[in-house]
Amino acid sequence: MTDDVLVVHGGTPLQGRIRVRGAKNLVSKAMVAALLGDSPSRLFDVPKIRDVEVVRGLLGLHGVKVTDGDDDGELVFDPANVESASTDQINVHAGSSRIPILFCGPLLHRLGHAFIPDLGGCHIGPRPIDFHLQALREFGATVDKTPEGLHLSAPNGLRGTKFALPYPSVGATEQVLLTAVMAEGVTELRNAAVEPEIIDLICILQKMGAIIKVHTDRVIEIQGVPKLHGYTHRPIPDRIEAASWAAAALATRGHVEVLGAEQADMMTFLNVFRSVGGEYEVTDARPPKLGHPGQEGGIRFWHPGGELNAVALETDVHPGFMTDWQQPLVVALTQARGLSIVHETVYEQRLGYTEALNSMGANIQVYRDCLGGTPCRFGRRNFKHSAVIAGPSKLHAADLVIPDLRAGFSHLIAALAAEGTSRVYGVDLINRGYEDFEAKLADLGAHVERP
């Protein structure tokens, strides 16, 4: 494990400028969508992260030729020769990723069958997978369970359907979109997720020739078409990464400019950031003119000095406060005066990372009760999904082991904010969603090193 550890010398405010690229939660789905086209697709601003490597490998296994374009971060997908892949190959490439399940609809359209490896190792529970399978069955797919995974087929093709999600799951909404666009007839999806990444995926599918209407009250209507062509698209920027660096600036009493960050998709986060006592300034992009190179837009985040304010917040589906935003922000809340309350309503096991923060001197208590008014699925199911953070707490260095992607970045922020030298183990997990984060830390003046 010694090659997967980062030594962090904490206590130095982060100062400087970094850039975020296309959203992790959109780019991988855009890559899968390329399977549906009968001509090549082109995707720009793709981050160099582990999830992209996984999808690139899976596409290659299925006969899609993936090449680097002329621009940095540009990928070109040629789906002319889509073919089946062996279960062993899929298992090797997929690892613990849940991405393979989104291949089902496109592969059923292109080949008439699909395979999903065993996803039992998923730490967020079986519910999202159940949503996916239920939706695919509604379209007419048959699902056969075997020891190595799930084999799907569509002997009579796929047909449009009316379907209501029990919960506005992002993954299940993506599944329905990727399947419905070429299913015969009309599909109506109720209680759909409407995250910005979902809307951007709809934009991609519309570019490909799909007919998709987004109605009010989380209703999406898709009219199936017989064929789709390739797309050219620049994805929305990664609002999770942008917020993570903002939280790092706040926790370390620093000043970080995040180029590429966009205000519109971060409004809920920005309101909370300001309520906590952080400051930010939005810089609009300027197009190049004769004699002037232009300027990329972004958002500057900084700690203005003085004390931070305790807040009460609840995570929720969009347009609520994103579940992936709360973990980095909680590190900053350990430095706020008073009692902050966090009610997690999206994932039932998202607060385990607080144990590591407590080992560093934070004062965080987790509860099974719903400490908030947002309707919650977990309140009577024995999950510790609410937290009370008492601050300010002086954080000290510790040895930390990263359990998952977002918790990992929170541990990293805590090590940066703490006094002394921490060793953070399992940092390669952070590469799943944060491109070149060690170089970005260096650009911000952080004192980190591999042993």
Image (tube, rainbow, N blue to C red):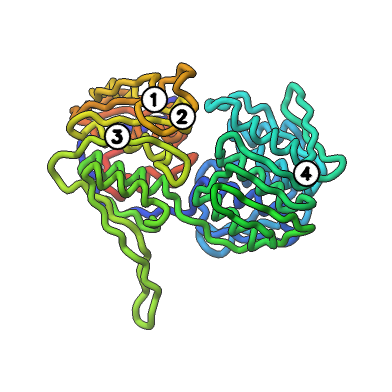
| Label placed on residue 312 | 3
- One can see residue 98 in this view: yes
Q: Earlier in the sequence, mark 2 or mark 1?
A: 1
Residue 48's spot in the image, x, y percent?
A: 50, 48
Q: Which residue position is annotated with label 1?
A: 370
Q: CA distance from mark 2 to mark 1?
A: 7 Å
Q: Earlier in the sequence, mark 1 or mark 4?
A: 4
At horizontal 64% and vertical 63% (from top left) the residue drawn is 207
Secondary structure at badge 3 equals strand
Residue 450 seen in render = no
Q: Taking 85 as reference, is 387 left or right?
A: left
Earlier-in-chain disc, 3 versus 2: 3
Q: Dots 3 and 4: beta carbons under 8 Å?
A: no
What residue is drawn where x is 46% and y is 16%?
Answer: 382
Could you tell me how far apart the alpha carbons at marks 3 and 4 are, in whole angstroms?
45 Å
Rendered location of residue 225, percent (x, y): 76, 58
Give the Cα separation between the discs numbered 1 and 4.
41 Å
Which residue is more in the foreground, 434 or 24? Answer: 24
Q: Which residue is mark 2?
A: 376
Cβ atoms under marks 2 and 4 closer than 8 Å:
no
Q: Residue at x 30, y 20 (%)?
A: 365
Name the secondary structure under disc 1.
loop
Q: The C terminus is located in which quarter?
A: top left
For label 1, the crowd category at 10 Å Cα-Cα, with few meaning under 14, some 14 to 19 and many 20 or more, is many
**Tag count:** 4
Q: Residue furthest right?
A: 156
Circle on res. 341: none
Type of amino acid at the residue the image marks with label 1: Cys
Q: Which residue is mark 4?
A: 108
Secondary element at tag 4? helix
